[in-house]
Image: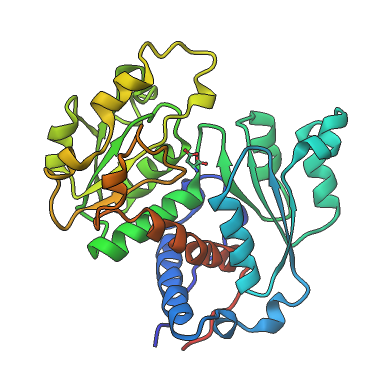
Amino acid sequence: MNQVTKSSSASSLLYIDDLSSANLDYLLKTAALFKKEFYKTGSLIHCINPEQTKGMVVQLLFAEPSTRTRASFEVACGKLGIATTSLWNLHFSSMAKGETLEDTFQCLMALKPNMIVCRCGELKAIEVFLHSSSIPVISAGMGTKEHPTQALVDAFTIQEKRGKVEGEKVLIVGDVLHSRVANSNLRLLIRLGAQLGVCAPEALSPADKQAWKDVIRFSSLEEGIKWADVIMCLRVQRERHSLRNIGFSMAEYRDHYRIDQENMQMFRSDGILLHPGPAVRGVEIANQALNDPRCHIITQVENGTHVRSAIISLMLNLEIKSL
Ligand code: ASP
């Protein structure tokens, strides 16, 4: 029997710290249960009482590009019998007519969906507004600040493939400065007892030195790879560099920070390579490294839907059956 006990339901999930330790435990266990049941039966609907989700609608609003996160939220809702409606091409929304994001949110909330999933830039007014919403809101990534559901997917994948998160040495490589994934992972993985290392060009290193003070800095990628159990490679967020001169070319970046066949030879044989996606082939990861059996990027995508089904269950207070 895989019964999971839920503590309290979180009212909104904008940051990792919105989740209690009991919530984290619930999410990791429920995602594992969902993955196992889905493998066995090809469905999740038997894990819940379908009467509970009948007639439920989740509204998605994506004000920044997305493939995996948006699709996996839609699939995760569908597997629980929840309908979704999605607003993502904002050129065809009232925002193109001059409406503010806050007013757009207010309008969507007036439609009374059961929950809102949103990806948007980092705006204090929006954060305050979303946090005080009477409808549960899940952040699907906010500017460079946080991406809590991706960090949960990463922690789940580490636990699944390495057997545990506690004590694991996780090396984060690349554009940490602009990465909401890195910021959420910093908070989550440290809470779960992992050790963190970082290898990044100076211009893309974390700006919040205090938050990253317990993280080991590696100036050489090889040194970091020899130390690590898990490599978490990040995308170079070129769309966020427009106002900054980062002081090096992509060719220089590739020469010093790309994960390739050569440096993968220095990585432990049972280590795992992760990337939240989309990975830019040749720049952050070479083709051979993407084909290496230690690369679990597609597993992360697959786990994304199970972890998000668990998050939706928590936020909507769904009862999970004892199986
Ligand atoms: N998909 C992740 C995000 O939305 C990572 C990335 O875009 O680089 O933050």
- Depth check: give the residue in front, 9 or 163: 163
Q: Quadrant of residue 84?
A: bottom right
Q: Quadrant of residue 25?
A: bottom left
The structure residue drawn at horizontal position 61% and vertical position 73%, both measured from the top left corner, is 79
The structure residue drawn at horizontal position 26% and vertical position 33%, both measured from the top left corner, is 198
Horizontal arrangement in the rendering, residue 264 relative to residue 26 (left or right): left
Q: Is residue 223 above or below residue 322?
A: above
The structure residue drawn at horizontal position 49% and vertical position 20%, both measured from the top left corner, is 241
Q: Is residue 29 above or below residue 215?
A: below
Q: Is residue 23 visible?
A: no
| Percent x, y of residue 80 | 62, 74
Q: How many marks?
A: 0
Horizontal arrangement in the rendering, residue 227 relative to residue 125 (left or right): left
The structure residue drawn at horizontal position 16% and vertical position 27%, both measured from the top left corner, is 220
| Percent x, y of residue 236 | 42, 30
Horizontal arrangement in the rendering, residue 190 relative to residue 48 (left or right): left
Q: Is residue 233 visible?
A: yes
| Percent x, y of residue 64 | 63, 37
- Depth check: give the residue in front, 281 or 211: 281
| Percent x, y of residue 212 | 32, 31
Horizontal arrangement in the rendering, residue 90 relative to residue 298 (left or right): right
Q: Quadrant of residue 75?
A: bottom right
